[in-house]
Image (tube, coloured by chain):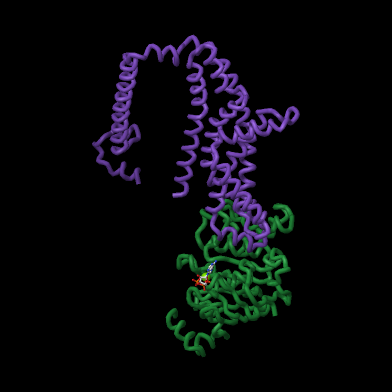
Chain colours: A green, B purple
Amino acid sequence: MKLEIIDLWKKFGANVVCKGIDLAVNEGEMVCLIGASGSGKSTLLRCINLLEPVDDGRILLDGLEITDPEQDPQPIRQRIGMVFQSYNLFPHMNALENVLLAPRRITGRSRAELRPMAEALFERFNLADRMGHYPDQMSGGQQQRVAIIRALAMKPEVMLFDEVTSALDPELVGEVLDVLRQLKAEGMTMILATHEMGFAREVADKVCFLDAGRILEEGPPEQLFERPREPRTAEFLSRVL
Amino acid sequence: MGASERQAAPAGSGAAGRESGLSRRERRERRERRRSMLIAAASTAIAIAAIVILVPMTPGWEKVQKAFFNEAVFVKTFPKLLEAFWLDVAMFLWCAPLIAVWGLVLALMRDARSPALYPLKLFAILYSDLFRGVPVILVIYLIGFGIPGLGLPRPWNSPYIWGTVALVLSYSAYVAEVYRAGIESIHESQRAAAVSLGLSHGDMMRFVVLPQAIRRVIPAAMNNLISLQKDVALVSFIGPVEIFRQAGVYKSLYANFTPYVGAALIFLVVTVPATRAVDRMIARQQRRQS
Ligand SMILES: Nc1ncnc2c1ncn2[C@@H]1O[C@H](COP(=O)(O)OP(=O)(O)OP(=O)(O)O)[C@@H](O)[C@H]1O
Ligand SMILES: [Mg+2]
């Protein structure tokens, strides 16, 4: 088991957002989280990346409890990459600097040493000609791909994607989904919060339907999309499909 | 767009205009600009003439002229005032970097989020309340007279040191607020992105938040520096003979206010261009953001 979430609880004040979530992700698997707005998808991902402290429960990465309060979160975050809906590139740095910042600071190696690694990533995702561009000189799709490259440059073992195509113009969604397909083919372990039901059905190994902070139903996409067991899942799917 | 309009204009409409490379609209605008400039010049000339003619007709003018615009006194005192102004410049030059650094430290303390650092945050909050709540001149008096009063040995009883310490303490409270506004204007998602990459809190501030925040607040910080350039004169109240005090000495010596006018002129020569430069900087930044 690559990643295991056991009875995770998270609340903001009186608002309980995760109510005992259990989830297991195998190495190389892609798990899609679907569910209505406010069901807790983003919060779950942020807990996995330790951006939010959890109230109860445990998250294990390769058997290591990362939610242990004694655990230093920084090295854990380096092992888990995260990509956001709004790209969140650093606007005062060009694409290459965005990608190099974390590797430079964390490995202590120089730009020159790290540059080949970054260049290889830009080439792999057909962005070699955008390395010197600043975020405001790139399309949304290009920015999101740079954000993915930036996360990959830390050589993460797990990647989290929070609605990474939701802010994009429709014609740019495809290029970002292609990157996700490519990563899946290369064996990356991924968890995606998404509204792209077609994509989830095509690529996911497992789909989880979140409802009011619980995983109400999970299963392989064919089963969950074609023969949902829970009436609420069926209702949600009929609304979005 | 402009070019196609120009080409579309009928051939006979203005060979001359085409030759000078101006479209009809550009020529009209230039004409209007010239006319409004003429009007502005004329009305300014009339206003100045009125002052020059009417003010000397007032009953007290002759006395005021002698007391404030006395050429002989001006010529005698101006060079020495200029010399004394260097002390203002020097005090400004050693205060400004200290304020920039201490203000930043305060702003970072204020931004502290972990409970363990709460005492620092509380200190920064109280500090800013205290020094923004008390007039600069009072801080200068209290520190400038109070600390040397402890009977410290030279050079630690110098009013130069304690006067400027007072300025640094006061001004960094304001500058810290400026930095803080900048830091808070950087969206939380930038921090999340930095932290999710595994960067430490320090690296996140240093490489992601501060470069963006400081760029945004440079104009506001510059405005603070301009008022600092004027407020260094307040240090004279505890001793140092800088331009304001020097002007006071001459006022007593010649029983004449002209030295103050000279001092004001010297300040204007520095602060007016600086203010203009900052205004331009703000305008440029606003254009870039829109
Ligand atoms: N930092 C926060 N402080 C307080 N409440 C929060 C915070 N973040 C999320 N919430 C609340 O948690 C609940 C779940 O939000 P979350 O963003 O996880 O939902 P989501 O499933 O990602 O929705 P969406 O599809 O709109 O992105 C919402 O009610 C939201 O208001
Ligand atoms: Mg969300």
Q: Nearer the viewer, residue B202 or A204?
A: B202
Q: A200 above or below A114? A: below
**Does residue B150 appear left or right of residue B131 in this picture?**
right
The residue at the far right in this view is B153
Q: A85 above or below B100? A: below
Name the residue: 30% across, 19% down: B50
**Does residue B6 appear left or right of residue A117 in this picture?**
left
Name the residue: 49% across, 22% down: B265
Quarter-wise, where is residue A74 in the image?
Answer: bottom right
**Is residue B283 in view from this perspective?**
yes
**Is residue B207 in view from this perspective?**
no
Q: Position of residue B138 (x, y in %)?
A: 57, 35
Q: Position of residue B152 (x, y in %)?
A: 74, 31
Name the residue: 59% across, 39% down: B170
Name the residue: 60% across, 54% down: B111
Q: B135 above or below A103? A: above
Q: Position of residue B35 (x, y in %)?
A: 28, 29
